[in-house]
Image (cartoon, helix red, strand yellow):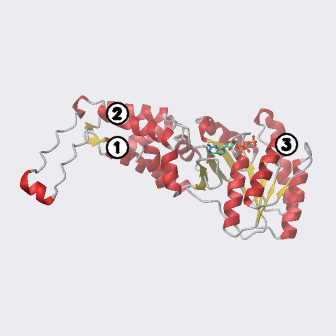
Amino acid sequence: MSFFTKLRERLTGSSSKIGAGLDGIVDAAPEAAPAPAPVPSGGIVGRLFGTAPAKPEEPRRALDDEMLEELEDMLVQADLGVDTALRVTANIAEGRMGRRLSSTELKELLAGEIARIMTPVARPLPLYPKKPQVVLVVGVNGAGKTTTIGKLASQFRAAGKSVMIAAGDTFRAAAVEQLQIWGQRAGVPVMVAAQGSDPASLAFDAMTRAEAEGTDLLMIDTAGRLQNRQDLMEELAKIVRVIRKKDPTAPHNTLLVLDATTGQNALNQVETFRQLADVSGLVMTKLDGTARGGVLVALADRFGLPIHAIGVGEQIDDLDAFDANDFARALVGL
Ligand SMILES: Nc1nc2c(ncn2[C@@H]2O[C@H](COP(=O)(O)OP(=O)(O)OP(=O)(O)O)[C@@H](O)[C@H]2O)c(=O)[nH]1
């Protein structure tokens, strides 16, 4: 199954909210009753040439202030956030006031606006010739860091890269175990340390081993205890300090993993983690089974940080590069 097919099938929580919302807005107009279907050309000619009966016309609604307000409210409800909803609505309105739009046309227009916002941020994780390329992975507990590291490691392996993982959340035995399972699946070594030991020292050991073995990519998992922000900030800063002793240009990427089901809270998490670490790109997980996928549009619009990948399930191939057009169309239910 192609990733786009999967995305469309699994984004239904969000897409049915937006798609049905747009249908509802157009149908709500008193004048929106569908035009009667043109009489099919029946008779002998129709039978001979198999003319299909014409489809009834889609209902239409003239674009006015009231309709725009409904559109804006619906987009806010769908987690695009007020600023983005306003901008998108204004762009759709421009030069189209009074025009009678069908729901399909409205979906096409919205998808176009969303794609326009998302295209500049749809950028795969950049790969550098540097060995090891160090990828620091940050995010709150449960956001999907472990799973994302496992999926990315497996994809890089499949692309012929050598990968190593460092289980930097040394306080949580369950997190380390999960990472080991993902490492086994991906065929990638996982460096672990004794429970509660210093993550920076593990990161240093992992750097040493990755350098010695000529590993292409070193992915470092980190803790996500936001409840203790000061500690976390110091822990992340120390990891960075220590790996820079080995390579002053590291980490080459700092990935922030976000959980789509948290909706608008994802925006706060970006703000917070940007204060804790030099976030260079985003991965959004759990777009399946949530009606809050619109938050990705708000994130792109607000921060302009690259979106490297999106996750739509728990399996190894349920993470893929982010494609702005595919996402925009799937999100509006096209
Ligand atoms: N449905 C769905 N579940 C996901 C996705 N990504 C991760 N998960 C699940 O989310 C849960 C948390 O993922 P983890 O990868 O363990 O998250 P983490 O950020 O490492 O969290 P901790 O290990 O608690 O720090 C797991 O049950 C994953 O299977 C996704 O794209 N879709």
Instruction: Tell me where residue 256 appears, x and y as whole percent.
Output: 69, 48
Residue at screen point 13% across, 48% down = 40
Q: Nearer the viewer, residue 333 or 78?
A: 333
Q: Which mark is residue 173?
A: 3
Q: Is residue 19 found left or right of 37 in the rendered image?
A: right
Q: Disc 3 vs disc 2: which is toward the camera?
A: 3
Q: Which mark is residue 106?
A: 1
Q: Which residue sits furthest left?
A: 44
Snapshot quadrant of residue 151: bottom right
Q: Which residue is mark 2?
A: 25
Assess mark 3: CB under 8 A from ligand 1? no
Q: Earlier in the sequence, mark 3 or mark 2?
A: 2
Q: How far separated are the C-alphas under marks 3 and 1?
A: 50 Å
Amino acid type shown at disc 1: Leu
Q: Tag 2, which secondary structure?
A: helix
Please determine whether, in this image, residue 1 is positioned above or below residue 30.
below
Q: Which mark is residue 214?
A: none
Residue at screen point 42% across, 44% down = 333
Q: How far separated are the C-alphas under marks 3 and 2?
A: 50 Å
Snapshot quadrant of residue 156: bottom right
Q: Nearer the viewer, residue 154 or 202?
A: 154
Snapshot quadrant of residue 70: top left
Residue at screen point 81% across, 47% down = 177
Q: Count neighbours of disc 2 (C-alpha within 10 A) and say few if under 14, some if 14 to 19, many if 20 or more.
A: many
Q: Tag 3, which secondary structure?
A: helix
Q: How far separated are the C-alphas under marks 2 and 1?
A: 10 Å
